[in-house]
Each structure stands twice: as C-alpha cells, then as structure tokens.
Amino acid sequence: MSANDSSNTSRTNWAALEAMTDEEIDYSDIPPLTEEFFEKATLRIPAAQAHKLIQLDPDVMAWFQSQGAEYKTLINSVLRRYIETNGDRAN
C-alpha cells in the first residue's frame, strides 16, 4: 500500500452496505481462507499499539483472568501498587 492509497477517499456507499444483510453481500470474488493461508499469516500490530504490549506467563494471565472481567484493571492496579511501594528503585 502506498501513501497515496491511505489518503484517497473511499467511494464505498457505506450506508447501503450497512443496510444489507450478510446474505445479500456478494463475497464471490474473495478466495476461501485455507489452512495454508493461516500457516503463512503474520500478526501485524500497529506501531502506536505495539508499545503497550507486555508478555505475561500463561499461568499468571490465567490467574488474573480468573479474577473476573476487569482483570486488565486489576493487573494495572497491582503494577501501580508495586511502583508506589518500591518508589524509584530501578533494580
């Protein structure tokens, strides 16, 4: 995609498309997604969001998720309390 592609205004009639049911949309020109497609697929995260990612061990994530729907808020709260308790200690 070139820089010009992202600055062009879409000519799609979004109102008409949103009014259609899934059955009315013609998907015939889109090839089926095969196992090969998914084997070759690469997850691309926009740079603006990538800096927000952290890697947690699966068991740690599972524990936080088991605490309820607001587990991300809980993770943030625990990390904030750690910072407040440990002050400016870098190590």
Image (tube, grey):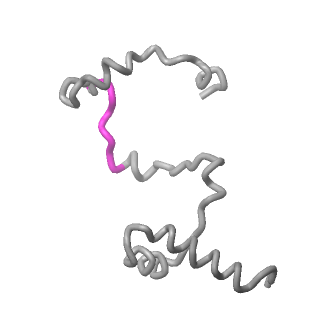
Res. 30 image quadrant: top left
Disc tally is 0
Which residue lies at the image location 43% right of the left edge and 81% below the top edge?
63
Judged left or right of residue 22, residue 81 is: right
Q: Is 34 covered by the magenta stretch?
A: yes
Where does the image place residue 66, in percent across and percent down from the top left? 37, 77
Residue located at (51% from left, 50% from top): 42
72 horizontally vs 65: left or right: right
Q: Is residue 82 magenta?
A: no
Taking the view exactly as shown, the residue that stands out farthest to the left is 23
Please tell me which residue is depicted at 64% across the width and 75% down the height of the picture: 80
Image position of 31 (left or right of 55): left
At x 49%, y 80%, the residue is 60
The secondary structure that most of the magenta stretch takes on is: loop
Which region of the structure is painted magenta? 28-35
Q: Is residue 29 left or right of residue 75?
A: left
Quadrant of the rendering where the C terminus is positioned: bottom right
Q: Position of residue 38 (x, y in %)?
A: 40, 50
Vertical placement of 87 versus 42: above or below? below
Q: Position of residue 79 (x, y in %)?
A: 62, 76
In the depicted view, which residue is nearer to us: 39 or 86?
A: 86
Q: Position of residue 26 (x, y in %)?
A: 25, 23
* Image quarter of the N terminus: top right
Front position in the image: 26 or 33: 26
